[in-house]
Amino acid sequence: MTDILARIDGEPLDTSAVERAVSGPANGAVVIFNGVVRDHDGGQAVSALEYQAHPDAERFLEQCCAEVSAESGLPVAAVHRVGSLTVGDLALVAAVASPHRAEAFATCAVLVERIKKEVPIWKRQHFASGASEWVGL
């Protein structure tokens, strides 16, 4: 298996770089998940998010990607953003490639759920009202 792209980054995310990390001539399907900062949560208007990561978060992300790749036999990649983000910014880009679409869709869903559950990254939501709250602590 080739190297897996799994990175925590403070800069805007490049969807095409994540796609290139999994693409290849044997794969007829590439599924990309773009996690985008939305303008609401729980009935409140969201103005911005702030993501913070545990110092070992990238290691957890690498492990998560490696395990999903090993279990599925498919190439996977994921990059998660940290820092201050505004509505419309990409917070997570994950990709999976496979010969056929069904496996790529299913594996990408597993990958994203595992990242959300296993990688120690927390977000602080800033609401239009001026209030804020931490999620995932």
Image (cartoon, rainbow, N blue to C red):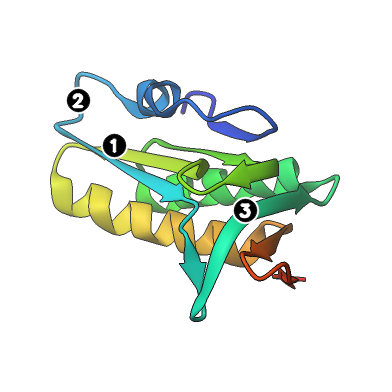
Q: Nearer the N terminus, badge 1 or badge 2?
A: 2
Q: Which mark is residue 26?
A: 2
Q: Which mark is residue 97?
A: 1
Q: Whole-Å distance between the Cαs marked 1 and 2?
A: 9 Å
The answer to whether 55 appears left or right of 74 in the picture is right
Residue at horizontal 45%, vertical 54%?
A: 111
Residue at horizontal 46%, vertical 40%?
A: 93
Label 3 secondary element: strand
Occupied quadrant, residue 66: top right
Q: Which mark is residue 31?
A: none
Please tell me whether mark 1 or mark 2 is closer to you in this view.
1
Q: Amino acid at mark 1?
A: Ala
Label 1 secondary element: strand
Q: Amino acid at mark 2?
A: Ala
**Eyeballing the image, is 54 above or below 15?**
below
Q: Which residue is mark 3?
A: 48
